[in-house]
Image (cartoon, rainbow, N blue to C red):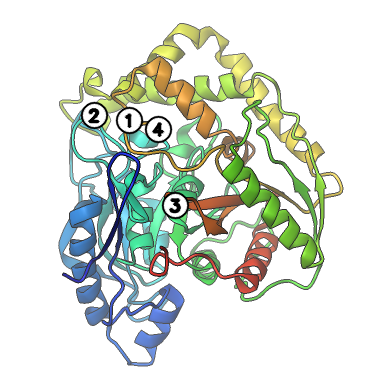
Amino acid sequence: MTTSEEQSQGRDQVRTRVHVFRDDALGDLDAVGLAAAIRRGEVSAAEAARDAAARVRDADALLDAVQVRLDEPAHHGGGGGAFAGVPTFVKDNTDYAGLPTGHGSAAFVPRPARRHAPFTRQLLSTGVTVLGKTRLPEFGFSPSTEFEEGPPVRNPWNTAHSAGGSSGGSAALVAAGAVPVAHANDGGGSIRIPAAACGLVGLKPTRGRVVPNAQGRQLPIDVVVDGIVSRTVRDSAAFLAAAELHHRNPKLPALGLVERPGERRLRIGLLVDSPNGVRTDEATRTAVTDTARRLERLGHTVTPVELNVDPRFTEDFLNYWGLLSFLIGATGRTMGAEFDRHRMDGLSRGLRATYAANWRRTPGVLRRLKRTREAYAAAFRGLDLILSPVLAHTTPPLGHLAPSVPYATLIERILAYVAFTPVNNVVGTPSLSLPAPTTTPDGLPIGVMFSGRPGAERTLLELAFELEADQPFPSIRDAA
């Protein structure tokens, strides 16, 4: 078997590390490297798709990351595009013509999509080869890709643990080496959370940097933005540059291709504990403070910062998340036949009930959330970026955040975990998860997060290049 399974006895169960890197057309290449090899004729797009499909079969047998696998890979780009011939997956909350969009839910039978979503067209403009669709938790609400029925998506670094959410299926495949990059989107951390859990680069772009998300643009506050998860900084940079050729937002500074570290030394704020009062655990705190010391060694200035959001921010964001669940319950028949809101999972039902009990507060919730940009801007006075954890504690074991956990307990656990990422979604600012240099005793990566002003993707990527060059990210192939 070509899948690498390395086992060690955990506290209460065997844990398995899974990767499918091997000597084939993909080798250990990232998307930029593979596209270059295809352009040079060293491998063909068909060979890359064939070998990626074989890797996906092996990885998915242990990770359960794939929702839909295409019998015949879809080739696009006509030989052009930065990622021409690179195999990838689309997340299963985004329409791909001819394939059903299930949103991770058992509440309806999805119909095949009539046309590509706008972001799907933007992704295809980069030249990728689509092999299928990846799994997500129901409607992307959970930070862990788990279900009331069916197996969870497992973390390839340690299959006893969560791969994060909501883009957990995409992150698991990329981390395991099945494909170099995969589609992800982020409405409260859903690019950055699975990137942190799986040791990947996860950049949530500025609102409007890529084409508007098909669901998010219908919301009173558009918190959702699309992107990718990748194993290297240059893949995330190359994706944004290629995507900009398809859609260029004139309201944002042009990005272009970022290829190397920047020369300017930055002023970086350090935020270790969450604005909502959640204290960061020791392993995560150490990863963030060690990163701060690295930045200082590289010549950057790091100073403590406070992000003084409204004390009701967490409650307000939870109510807003409940509004989304309420709207899905009310309009679900547009998604597919026989939609039954009573079959939505425990998290979705609990969020819907939360909103139903508090719907009269909606005008105040929206008003306060929109004012968050003022607190965010105030925190950035005199700063270029802010360094923080991605999550308040390290990646939990499967079951900790399962939708079968009683709602009151589950939401308490979610809020104690997802304590940093939602602010960027509300404000619409770019935010980047990078792997810290060390892993936990359970063999899991830890992510650190950099956040910027609107349109600051270049600054984020230049710093990410510098940190990656200074100390390469942990490799799943070398992990003990």
Residue kind at label 2, given as amino acid type:
Glu
Looking at the image, which residue sits at the far bottom? Answer: 41
Determine the residue positioned at 45% across, 58% down.
Answer: 229
Residue at mark 3 to residue at mark 2: CA–CA distance: 25 Å
Q: Which residue is mark 3?
A: 444
Task: Report if the CB atoms under discs 2 and 4 are less than 8 Å apart.
Answer: no
Residue topped by disc 1: 402
Residue beneath label 4, please? Answer: 141
At label 1, counting other C-alpha atoms closer than 10 Å, the crowd grade (few under 14, some 14-19, many 20 or more) is many
How far apart in space, not on screen, are marks 1 and 3 (Cα)?
A: 19 Å
Task: For residue 459, say whether it is visible.
Answer: yes
Q: Disc 1 vs disc 4: which is toward the camera? A: 1
Q: Earlier in the sequence, mark 2 or mark 4?
A: 4
**Which amino acid is tagged 4?**
Phe
Rendered image: mark on residue 375? none
Q: CA distance from mark 2 to mark 4?
A: 14 Å
